[in-house]
Image: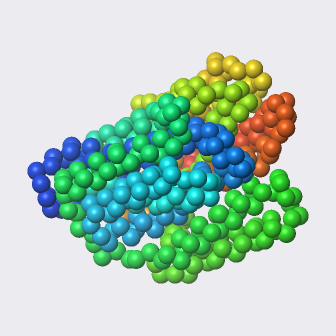
Amino acid sequence: MNSIERGAFARAVPLDDLSLSPKPRSSASPNTVLAIVCVGICLANLDLFIVNVALPNIGRDFKDASLDDMSWVLNGYAIAYAALLVFFGRLAERHRRNLSFLLGVGLFTVASAACAAANNVGMLTAFRIVQAAGAALMTPTSLGLLLAVFAPEKRGSAVRTWTAIGGLAAALGPVVGGVLVTVNWRWIFFVNVPIGLAAMVIGWWKLPEIEGHDAPRPKFLDAVLVTGGIGALVFAIVKVSDWGLRAPAIGYSFAAATILLGLFVWRCLRLENPFVDPALFRVRPFTGAALVMAPYSAAFGAMLLSVALWEQTAWGWSALQTGLAIAPGPLMVPITSLLFAGRLIARFGAAPVVTAGIVIFAAGLVAWATLIGPEPHMAFVIMGMIPTGIGVGLTFPTLMGVSAAGLPPSSFATGSGVINMIRQASLAVGVAIFVAIIGTPASLPERLVAFQRGWWVMVAIVALGLLPTYLYLRQKKAA
């Protein structure tokens, strides 16, 4: 779950139904526990935006790295997080949540140190996958710890605080990344180490013991199948512009993706304990939210990468300039989601709010495609970033709230994990599509045409979400 999804959790789930009995190991107050678990969420949220800003600098340091290769620094993380969030979330239910959370923070911290020491793209991508595993473990366990230590009447407030802090971390990501990259890009990873170590030491001392329960054990094979299938699909999309659609390797990759994902779906339909419960998709609002989330997230992932790439590779801006220019967009996300989305949903319903979010987000992409030229222009950047941030703030929390509203409380954790898996996988696919579209232009005019084409394609992709919004999320009038 990202920071936006956690806000939806607070609105959509009756938290007083969740009965947990922590065993305190110290005199830690609930607010102390909140502060500790927020550290882990801040690390994961900061990392998303920091890496996008730093990617061009990393590519210049690894002189033999192409954009295709560098895209896996983002996509490897997204794909692993997508598959492992559901797997680790269900596995962690069987074990003590405080220990699972500390293990996730520890894994993320060690992987961050390894990322900082990487000397080629392959090593960096591999360690980013380990980072994703740590994030996938600490995200659901941190929420479990919060629900255990706060009284039922205060749980909603605690989760909203957690949401706001995570959203603020995401908003600060571009600026923090820009500052750290001015020293060296390796600092965007190394800075996680002392923070993670402090969280582990204090967490070991202060976090209460929250025992697990006898939950069904998830099948690791299913996680491998979905990871391999999405990875093969992304690889084929990224390489198709270089090798051509008729290249044997492209055909083999698409075939592997079809077989692996098909086998994954077959197992979900046949097993008694499926990785993804097909019953979720018999809930109409959940299905609608999933169908909208996929194209929306693909466009969002492409937007994040394209903005940082254009400003640094075409305009020659520094990472700090890029971070400051991007910051207004992410900053609008928590403001819009926390202050406006809930009120608009209560007044107009989910479908109009999602529609508005898609249209406003698309307007930001249109601004980029029509206004951006070879000459740097800060005002045009902001004119593109603010609408995309508002669009994200309207759409993501609404989709998460809608997807959860039709599910029983016992299925929310699974449903939220599945929606987030779709979101992360779609982010990777969106990045792959954009990389394939822009290719390797030799001149600035060619680069401009390629990026404009990419932004228009993303407008078309995000617009695909309008149809399931109308078909599945629109409230039917009473007879």
Q: Is residue 318 left or right of residue 445?
A: left
Image position of 461 with respect to 328: above or below: below
In the depicted structure, whether residue 301 falls above or below residue 291: above
Q: Is residue 130 left or right of residue 164?
A: right
Where is residue 294? Give x, y as percent. Answer: 62, 52
Q: Is residue 362 visible?
A: no
The image position of residue 141, as x and y in percent, is 34, 59
- Rendered image coloring scheme: rainbow
Which residue extends farthest left?
27
Tell me: 389 left or right of 155: right
Residue 449: image x %, image y %? Answer: 83, 34
Q: Who's the residue at 71% across and 60% down the image? A: 235
Q: Is residue 376 left or right of residue 97?
A: right
Quadrant hosting residue 208: bottom left
User: Which one is in front, 400 or 77?
Assistant: 77
- At a point 15% along the width and 46% down the height, the residue shown is 29
Numbered disc total: 0
Displayed quadrant of residue 359:
top right
- Considering every residue shown, the one lying at the far right of the view is 246
- In this rendering, the answer to whether 12 lies above or below 388 is below
Give the image location of residue 169, x and y in percent: 42, 37
Picture quarter containing residue 355? top right
Which of these two is toward me, 305 or 366?
305
x 56%, y 49%: residue: 473
Q: Is residue 86 visible?
A: yes
Residue in the picture at 10% in, 50% down: 27
